[in-house]
Amino acid sequence: MTFSLNDEQRMLKDAARDFFREQAPVARLRKQRDAKQNGRDPELWSQIAALGFAGVIIPEEYGGAGLGYVALGAVLEEGGRTLVASPLHSSALAGASALLLAGTDAQKQEWLPKIAAGEVVATLAVDEGAHHAPRTKSKLKFEDGKLSGDKKYVADGHIADLIIVIGADALFLVKADAAGFTRRELITADSRGAADLKLDGVAAEKMNGGAEIIDEVLDRARIGLAAEMLGQASEAFEITSEYLKTRKQFGQVIGGFQALQHRAAKLFTDLELTRSCVLAALDALDRSDKRIAEYASLAKARASETLHLATNEMVQLHGGIGMTDEHDAGLYLKRARVAEALYGGASFHRDRYATLLGF
Amino acid sequence: MTDQLEAFRAETRAWLDANCPHSMRTPMTGEDDAVWGGRNYTFPSEDAKLWLERMGAAGWTAPTWPKEYGGGGLSADENRVLQSELKRIGARPPLFSFGLWMLGPALLEYANEEQKREHLPKIVRGEIRWCQGYSEPGAGSDLAGLQTKCEDKGDHWLINGQKVWTSYANHADWCFCLVRTDTSVKHEGISFVLIDMTLPGVETRPIKLISGSSPFCETFFTDVKVPKHQMVGRLNGGWEIAKRLLQYERTNISGFGSNTRVDVVDIAKQNVGVTDGKLEDRDLRARIAAHKMTERAYALTTQRAQEEAKAGGNVSHMASMFKVAGATLNIDRCELMVEAAGNRALGWSGEGFAPDELAVTRGWLRSKGNSIEGGTTEINLNVVAKRVLGLRDTQ
C-alpha cells in the first residue's frame, strides 16, 4: 500500500489544480447557476476532455491513458476543491468503471473511446426512491430486450447520452435517444442538476455479470466520489481557517480564541484521518485489493461525515457572512449534502461496514 | 529489495530462531507480562530475562541507535526487516522502557559524549529503569510553571521540590527531571537534569487511581546533591529538550490500546445478542461501526505519516494530533466495551466476576487518564491550532 503519488500522478494532479483554479473557480459554478444552466457547461467539459481527464482510467487500447484510480482520484479531488460542475465523476469514473467491469467487448469498443474523448457522457442510474438502496428495492422489468421502470435522482441524468441502468441483479445499457426513454430534469440544491428517468419498454443491452459486479461498480463510484468530497472538505476547511486568521472582533483575530482554535484543530484531525481512508481506497483499487467493499464504505462514510462537519463549521465560523448567497460557504454546504446522499451516506455505509466485518 | 537486505533478513531470521525463547513467541496475556528491567527487577519468567539479555546484547532493543552506545546500529531499512521478522514469529517486546521511548532519543540529540556513554548502553540492556520528573502540583498543563529548585553549589547541584504523576517512580532507578535554575524568567529558566533515585533526599509515594492501580507516584526531593555533569544541554536550556521529549511521549501514548486482544465486537456479540448476523442493539451496532472506522482511519494515518517521514517529510509536528486522536480512540473503545458488556463490566473484585471482565472495568477507568497524561487533549489541541494551523492570538 502507498499513500504517495508517483511522478506521473503528481504531474496530473498539479495540472488539474492549475486548470481548475484558473478556468473553473467557484465563480464559474456561480455564473452557471445564475444563468440557470443547471450544471450544463459544454465548453468547460470539452476543455476537461481535451486535457485527457475523461480518459484517465480508460486503457490506452480504448483511447484513454490507463493511469488508474489514484490518478483520477487526484483530478477529482482538485475539481472538488473548486466545486467544478462537470460529469467527470459520473462519466469518466462511474460510467467508465461499469463498462470496464461489465461491458462486453463490443460495448467497450463502442463506448469507452467516446467517453475518454468526452464525446459521450455516461452515468449510472441506481436508485428508485429517496434513499440509496441498490439492488434490494429495484422494480425494473426486462423482457425481450426491453427495459421498463423508474430511476430517480440520477446524477448528471439530465445531460447523459448513455445510461447504465442498475437492476436487482443485472446492468443494462440504455441510450438517451432511444424510443420510450423520457426524463424529467431536476433542479437540485447544488446547482449541478439531475434527472428522474422513465423507461417504458426502452431498447436495452444487458451487460455482463450480476449482483457482485454491481457492488464492484458501485464501490468504484463511491471511492471516486469520496475523492471529490475530500477536495471539497479540504477547501472548505482551508477557506475557514484563513478567515479565522483575518477576521477581527474584540480587537483581535478570532483565530486567537481557544473555543474556535479547538474546533479548527478537531476538524483538521478529522480531515487528516479521512484523507488516509480515501487515498488508501484509491490505491486499493489500483492494487485490486480483495477488500474493496470495506475500503469503499470506509472512504464514503468518513468523507460524508467529514464534509458534513467541514461545511457546517464553514457556515458557523464565518458567522453572518456565511449565510449570505454572496459567500461561497453556501455553495459548499449544498454540494456537500448532495454528495453525501449520492451512492449512500454515512449511515448507509456504517451499516454496510458492520455487515462486512461480521456484526 | 537489495541482496544485502535479503542477506540481513536471512541472518536475522536464523538468529531469532536460535535466540527467541518459545514462550516469548506467544501473545502477552496482560500487563504483568511486560518486562521493564532495572536494578532490582523481578522478571516474570526466566525466558523473559533471557530474551532481554540476548536482545540487549545485540543492541536490538534499540535497533537504530549507534553501536558505540550499545544500540544495534541498523539502518532504517534494516530495522524494518528486523521488525517484520519479529512480527512474523509473534515475538514479545523484550523491554518496555521510558529510557528507550523517551529519554534515549533526547540524549542522542542533546547529551554530551560522556553522558551518552554513561547512560545509553544501560538503557539498551534494560539495566537502569528511568522515570520522568515533569509535572508538579502547581504545574500540570502549564508545565513551564514548574518550581522544583536547582541551585549551583559549586561542585554539585542542590535540588529541592516535588514532582507528581511520576510514572512508576517507586520502581525507577534514575529520573530525568525538569528543574528551575532561574526564577526571573519562565521557559528560559528551566534545565534538564538526570537524578539517581538512590541519592539521599529522594522519596516516592504511590498515588492510588480510580482504577484501583497505582502506576503514578509523588516524588519528593529534599536537599538532593546531584553531580554537576548530570545536567543535559546548557544551563537554562532544558525547555527545548523537554518539548522534544514530549513529542516522543505523545507519539507513545497515542499508540495505546492498538495491541489489546479483547475486541469490542466479540464482547458485543457475546452480551447483546445477534440475529441474522447483526447485533440486536442497532444503535450500539452503528456506534461500534463508526468506532471501527475511526480505528482503521487512525491506523491508516499512522501508516501514511511513517511513509511521509521515510520520504523525508517533517511529521514531528503531528505528534499532538496523533496524541489527541489516539487517546480519544482508546477512551471511546473502553466506553463501548463497558457498554457492550453491560453489568458484567461493572464489577470491582471477587469471585462474581471473571478476570477478563474485571480487566474491562479497570481498563476503562484507567483510560480516562489517556486524555490527561502527556499533555491534556485541550493542551494538544492548542498545539495543533498554533503550530500546525498557524492560529495565533494576534495577527
Image (cartoon, coloured by chain):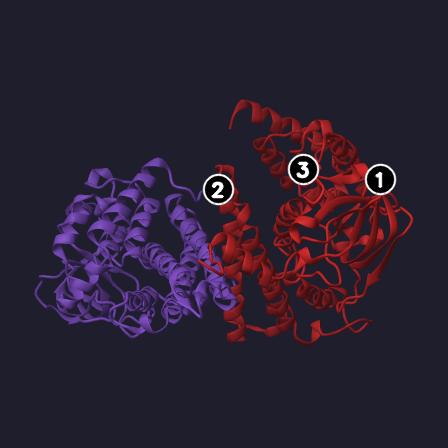
Position in image of residue B159 (x %, y %):
83, 50
Q: Which residue is mark 1?
A: B154
Q: Which residue is mark 2?
A: B308
The crowding category of the residue bearing disc 1, from other C-alpha atoms within 10 Å (few below 14, some 14 to 19, many at least 20), is few
Residue A7 sits in quarter: top left
Mark 1 or mark 3: which is in front?
1
Q: Please tell me which of labels 1 and 2 falls first in the chain.
A: 1
Compute the Cα span from label 1 to label 3.
Answer: 23 Å
Which amino acid type corresponds to the residue marked 1 in the rendered image?
A: Gly
Secondary structure under the numbered disc 1 in the rendered image: loop
Q: Is residue B188 left or right of residue A22?
A: right
Chain coloured red? B
B263 lies above or below A72: below
* Chain hosting mark 1: B
Q: Residue at x 10, y 68 (%)?
A: A180
Q: Which mark is residue B110?
A: 3
* Chain A visual colour: purple
Q: Are marks 3 and 2 in contact (CB under 8 Å)?
A: no
- Do discs 1 and 3 share a chain? yes
Which amino acid type corresponds to the residue marked 3 in the rendered image?
A: Tyr
- Do discs 1 and 2 share a chain? yes
Compute the Cα span from label 3 to label 2.
Answer: 25 Å
